[in-house]
Image (cartoon, grey):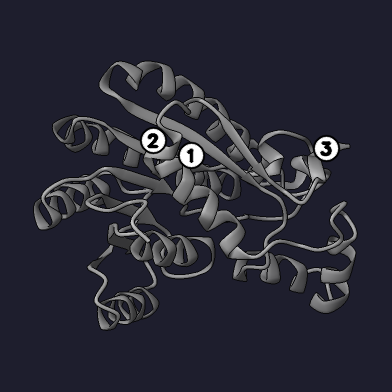
């Protein structure tokens, strides 16, 4: 219940899916949570739910592809809560599912702006408050497709590979500041993003069964599977862990 007591967590894309689950679990473990998203209704509803339970939280609208918005929100969150100890770079999009030669520049750039530049901007502007706090933990959501290839959604896969290497680079740069940087690599997790991806291909229930079969454990994951991994990496239990890849994929990449 107190694994993150006294810490302040900033979570992007926190209104739904993995971000929502992470916000709830971190709040339950004692963290004050800054919920960042562009889904205002869902973000505010989550904050209201947490506050009803006596868990401190606040919502900020933030498009992570906008450096000015990120800079402003990081400053406001640090002022509101008094510090920032944890950043979860969770916001992301899947993008178009086309072969590389059919993808437009705009379609490619949209995914990179959110999935890659968003991680860059948030990391860039959280370093100062983390230094003031005496250290911190940055958790970047990559993917199994930051580790292995797949014959679909090329912009997404490229972005998640970038996040994996950004994580290792920043882990080395900021280790002297006691800022740990790690990546999580989920397999297929049943979230609105995955459901939408499967729906675009036809029957989502048939798609789910097919995706279940891709994992040696026989099923897709749940958002809490990732949320608990993020709690661990944010906690002092992981004080000797940086530059690491936490793979939570039901065995997908073990083959």
- From the viewer's perspective, is residue 67 above or below residue 92? above
Q: Mark 1 = which residue? A: 116
Label 3 or label 2, whichever comes before in sequence order: 2
Location of residue 130 in the rendering, given as x and y in whole percent from the top left corner: 22, 35
Using residue 201 as the reference point, say whether residue 51 is left or right of it: left
Measured in 3D between alpha carbons, the distance from the residue under mark 3 to the one under mark 2, in whole angstroms, is: 29 Å
Q: Which mark is residue 120?
A: 2
Q: Mark 3 = which residue? A: 254
The nearer-to-camera label among 3 and 2 is 3
Q: Residue at x 27, y 48 (%)?
A: 70
Secondary-structure class at tag 2 = helix
Secondary-structure class at tag 1 = loop
- From the viewer's perspective, is residue 128 above or below residue 221? above
Measured in 3D between alpha carbons, the distance from the residue under mark 1 to the one under mark 2, in whole angstroms, is: 6 Å
Q: Residue at x 21, y 48 (%)?
A: 74
Using residue 244 as the reference point, say whether residue 62 is left or right of it: left
Location of residue 230 in the rendering, given as x and y in whole percent from the top left corner: 48, 49
Q: Residue at x 30, y 75 (%)?
A: 47
Query: In which image quadrant can residue 56 be found?
Result: bottom left
Query: In which image quadrant can residue 126 be found?
Result: top left
Measured in 3D between alpha carbons, the distance from the residue under mark 3 to the one under mark 1, in whole angstroms, is: 26 Å
Verify CB contact (< 8 Å) between mark 3 and mark 2: no
Using residue 168 as the reference point, say whether residue 15 is left or right of it: left
Quarter of the image where the C terminus is located: top right
Verify CB contact (< 8 Å) between mark 1 and mark 2: yes
């Amino acid at each position: 219940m107190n694994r993150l007591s006294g810490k302040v967590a900033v979570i992007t894309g926190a209104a739904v899916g993995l971000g929502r689950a992470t916000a709830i679990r971190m709040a339950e473990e004692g963290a004050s949570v800054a919920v960042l998203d562009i889904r205002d209704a869902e973000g505010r509803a989550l904050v209201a739910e947490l506050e009803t339970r006596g868990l401190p939280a606040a919502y900020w609208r933030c498009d992570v592809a906008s450096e000015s918005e990120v800079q402003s929100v990081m400053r406001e969150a640090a002022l509101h809560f008094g510090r920032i100890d944890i950043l979860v770079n969770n916001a992301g999009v899947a993008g178009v599912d086309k072969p590389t030669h059919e993808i437009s520049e705009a379609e490619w750039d949209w995914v990179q702006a959110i999935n890659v530049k968003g991680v860059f901007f948030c990391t860039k502007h959280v370093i100062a408050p983390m230094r003031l706090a005496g250290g911190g933990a940055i958790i970047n959501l990559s993917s199994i497709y930051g580790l292995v290839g797949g014959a679909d959604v090329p912009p997404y896969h490229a972005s998640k590979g970038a996040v994996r290497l950004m994580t290792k680079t920043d882990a080395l740069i900021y280790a002297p500041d006691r800022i740990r940087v790690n990546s999580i690599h989920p397999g297929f997790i049943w979230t609105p993003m995955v459901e939408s991806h499967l729906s675009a291909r036809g029957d989502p229930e048939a798609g789910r069964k097919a995706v279940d079969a891709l994992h040696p454990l026989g099923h897709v994951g749940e958002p809490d599977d990732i949320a608990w991994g993020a709690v661990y990496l944010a906690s002092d239990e992981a004080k000797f862990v940086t530059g690491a890849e936490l793979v939570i994929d039901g065995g997908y990449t073990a083959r």
